[in-house]
Each structure stands twice: as structure tokens, then as C-alpha cells.
Image (cartoon, rainbow, N blue to C red):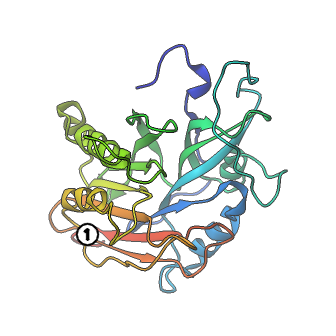
């Protein structure tokens, strides 16, 4: 978990602005997308989501987006000091692009952002996992994953949603696993260890006691190719997922196959499915769009 003396790793939380009463709950759209920092055009994606262009013509009025490689540009990121180590920078299409907090504010969405690593030593930037949503958020979790080449985390939170006046909170977990290939040795791929750590975390008694009544959604960039030699990581998550119906298995990365997934573990009667967006919106990853609905829709 988060060390008390690492203030620059503290999550950024931005409450969304809601000037009108939210629409009645019929379904919730959950998306996972690696935005490749400024290359992923988040405002354009959210606009199309709200217009229904990604959900069969039905506007997505209530949604949550799990983002990987989101960026923060802030004086809160410490000046790089000799002796420190840093991940190599990923440069977006526009070096002046604003940080994730600015984007969420402009879109009037709730945000939690948790930095995982610096974005190079030169600038006051870091990158990590973020979740933005139309819904109120609570119960933030940060899970430190086994270290291999870079610091990797999972970011979790709970959305407060209500169905016909009854609270049915939903737990979300956003993960970005190590990008390095399978390593030799007794312990296998770093991704296998990282995924198992996360699944163990989701099964902890303390976590189960706060399990959202609607269930849990696990999503992210697993850096695991569906059908590849490291698919054991995917299979572990798929076994955990007890509620996923139809799953779009088309490639999500421009050159590496399918790397991005959504897994659902919902209460009986809830249904879920996923589809891949046809556009990458400037990123090297396609967004994966999931829809889930309660047993009875008001």
C-alpha cells in the first residue's frame, strides 16, 4: 500500500460537477483504455460515448473509464534528483497537452488518478492509472504489484450508483501489468505474479467485507496477448470472472494483438458484455467498451 512519506504518490481526487439530477439507472458502461498519454484523444472519445456512437446508438449517460498511461503534469511531481531511477518518457502527440486532472475537470467527470512512475527525469511529469466517471466515488484502493522492471500498481474504487432508489455500489479495479516478456526462472512471467497478487487482494477478507453489492469489474492493459505463450495471465483473470457473457476478442493494440480486457464478477442476474471500439482515437490501443445491466431495468 501507499507509504506515508511518499506524498508525490498520493492519489489525485477530483469530484465531478453535477448540476442536474442523474437520469434513472438502466445500464452502466465501463471502458478500459490505454491512452498513451496525449496521443489518446480523451475528449473526443467521451463525446462519442455520450452520443451513443460506441453503444449501438444509445447514448451512454452513466459510465466509468479505466485509463492506463494517464499523465500528470504538476509541481507536485518532485524535481529529479541524482541517484533516482526513472522510467523512460512516453511522449504524446502534443507536448503541451494538459494533465488528467485538467481533462476530467473540463469533462465534468469525477476522477481518481494514482501515479505509478515518472514520465522521464527531465520534466515534472508522472504517469499511472486513472478512473473517470459520471458517478460519485469512494473507497479508493492502491495495490502495489510485484516489482520487475518498473513500478506497477492497480487502482481501485467504488462507484455509488442507485437503482430505483436502492444503492447498488460497484467496485472497479484498474490494472496495468508489466510490458516485459516472460522471464526465465522459477517464478515465470512477472505478469503472472502481478495478476495473482491482484486476485489475492480481491479475495482478502477485508476486501470481501466491502464488496460492492452489484459486484466487481476488473479491467486494464494486461500486456498479455490472447492466444500467446503468456496467456496463463489472461486465463487466471478469466477464471475469476464469473459473469462475462459475450467477449470481443479482436486485437486491441496496433501491432501486438489483444492486450486489453474487461472482466466482470457480478451478482446473479446481472449481465455483461464487451466490444472493441473500431477507432483508437489517436492511441496505439483500442478502447474496450463493456456494458452491464441489472436483473430488472426500471
Q: Where residue 247 sits: x, y (%)?
A: 32, 76
* Quadrant in the picture for residue 76: top right
Q: Where residue 34 sits: x, y (%)?
A: 56, 59
Q: For the view shown, which residue lies furthest in the front direction?
A: 184
Q: Which residue occupies 36% across, 48% down? A: 191
286 up-or-down from 5: above or below: below
Q: Secondary structure at mark 1?
A: loop
Left or right relative to 256: residue 203: left
Q: For the view shown, which residue lies furthest in the left direction?
A: 268
Q: Which residue occupies 62% across, 49% down? A: 70
Q: Where residue 192 sits: x, y (%)?
A: 30, 48
Q: Where residue 54 sits: x, y (%)?
A: 53, 79
Foreground of the two, 178 or 215? 178
Q: Dividing the image into 4 quarters, which one contains the N terminus?
A: top left
Q: Which residue occupies 55% across, 82% down? A: 278
Residue 26 seen: no
43 up-or-down from 141: above or below: below
How many residues crowd mark 1 within 10 Å: few (<14), some (14–19), many (20+)?
A: many
Left or right relative to 180: residue 105: right
49 up-or-down from 36: above or below: below
* Residue identifier under label 1: 244
Left or right relative to 141: residue 150: right
Amino acid at each position: 500500500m501507499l507509504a506515508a512519506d511518499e506524498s508525490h504518490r498520493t492519489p489525485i481526487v477530483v469530484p465531478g460537477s453535477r448540476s442536474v439530477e442523474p437520469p434513472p439507472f438502466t445500464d452502466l458502461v465501463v471502458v478500459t483504455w490505454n491512452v498513451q498519454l496525449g496521443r489518446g484523444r480523451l475528449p473526443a472519445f467521451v463525446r462519442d460515448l455520450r452520443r451513443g456512437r460506441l453503444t449501438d446508438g444509445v447514448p451512454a449517460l452513466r459510465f466509468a473509464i479505466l485509463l492506463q498511461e494517464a499523465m500528470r503534469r504538476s509541481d507536485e511531481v518532485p524535481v529529479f534528483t541524482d541517484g533516482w531511477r526513472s522510467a523512460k518518457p512516453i511522449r504524446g502527440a502534443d507536448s503541451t497537452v494538459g494533465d488528467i486532472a485538467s481533462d476530467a475537470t473540463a469533462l465534468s467527470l469525477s476522477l481518481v488518478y494514482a501515479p505509478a512512475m515518472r514520465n522521464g527525469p527531465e520534466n515534472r511529469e508522472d504517469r499511472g492509472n486513472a478512473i473517470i466517471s459520471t458517478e460519485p466515488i469512494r473507497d479508493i484502493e492502491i495495490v502495489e504489484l510485484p516489482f520487475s522492471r518498473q513500478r506497477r500498481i492497480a487502482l481501485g474504487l467504488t462507484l455509488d450508483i442507485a437503482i430505483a432508489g436502492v444503492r447498488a455500489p460497484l467496485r472497479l479495479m484498474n490494472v496495468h501489468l508489466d510490458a516485459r516478456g516472460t522471464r526465465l526462472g522459477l517464478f515465470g512471467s512477472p505478469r503472472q505474479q502481478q495478476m495473482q497478487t491482484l486476485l489475492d487482494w480481491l479475495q482478502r477478507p477485508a476486501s470481501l467485507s466491502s464488496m460492492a453489492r452489484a459486484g466487481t469489474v476488473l479491467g486494464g492493459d494486461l500486456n498479455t496477448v490472447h492466444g500467446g505463450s503468456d496467456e496463463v495471465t489472461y486465463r487466471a483473470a478469466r477464471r475469476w470472472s464469473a459473469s462475462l457473457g459475450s467477449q470481443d476478442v479482436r486485437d486491441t493494440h496496433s501491432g501486438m494483438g489483444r492486450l486489453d480486457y474487461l472482466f466482470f464478477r457480478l451478482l446473479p442476474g446481472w449481465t455483461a458484455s464487451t466490444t472493441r471500439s473500431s477507432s483508437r482515437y489517436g492511441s496505439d490501443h483500442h478502447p474496450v467498451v463493456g456494458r452491464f445491466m441489472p436483473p430488472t431495468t426500471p
